[in-house]
Image (tube, helix red, strand yellow):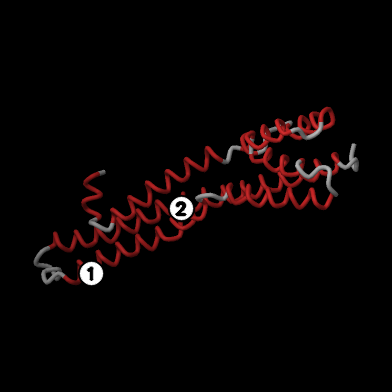
Amino acid sequence: MFSIIQAAGWPIWFLLAASILAVALIIERAGALRRPKIVPPGLLQRVVSEYQQGGATDEMLKRLDAHSPLGRVFAAGLRNAKNSREVMKEAIEEAGSGVAHELEHFLTSLGTIASISPLMGLFGTVVGMIEIFGSSTAAGNNPQALAHGISVALYNTAFGLIIAIPSMIFYRHFRALVDSLVIDMEQQAVKLVELVHGERS
């Protein structure tokens, strides 16, 4: 592996840094965007049951805030449960926007890595071609210089694609997952509003 890195030349270090960052972001988002952690099953039923028994107490709201992103959305709504349906929905929408922004954390960085990795590989390719054509002995007197330039060009192109393809796959996957989680939270929040205001049994 180290021999490949040596053959690829100095441009490969930028790609290696990008690959390490991409792996770290993928692992972080894979752990942070677990559905049971964001939208715990059965939370809506427990919240409605507790609200019907004792109302929205301060202790209940604090517990919901610390429980999960969906809990924060529910807590924002229940703080305004005594107001009109519209006010409660607005509070939920504001909290939901903040939660959605948190769920998208680092996704822009991962998408950027997926986009620029092929360009970084192309930069390495250009550097390799410059080494080939810039060498005064590249015409045939020194085949080692020619081989080194070709190695720099091809290895950097390959590394750029190797980083970009999985990064783009995970970026698209996490984007779709965030959209799904946000829709799920919106649907549960609407149900909470309707249950609190007696519009659904």
**SS under mark 1:** helix
Looking at the rendered structure, the kind of residue marked 2 is Ile
Left or right relative to 112: residue 17: left
> Disc 2 designates what residue?
165
32 or 83, which lies in front? Answer: 83
- Residue drawn 78% across the image and 50% down it: 89
- Residue drawn 85% across the image and 40% down it: 196
Q: Position of residue 123 (x, y in %)?
A: 32, 64
Left or right relative to 60: residue 112: left
When asked about the image quadrant of residue 61, the answer is: top right
**SS under mark 2:** helix
Position of the N terminus by quadrant: top left
Q: Residue furthest front?
A: 58
- Residue drawn 72% across the image and 40% down it: 75
Q: Position of residue 110 (x, y in %)?
A: 47, 52
Looking at the rendered structure, the kind of residue marked 1 is Ile
Query: CB under 8 Å between callouts 1 and 2?
Result: no
> Disc 1 designates what residue?
130
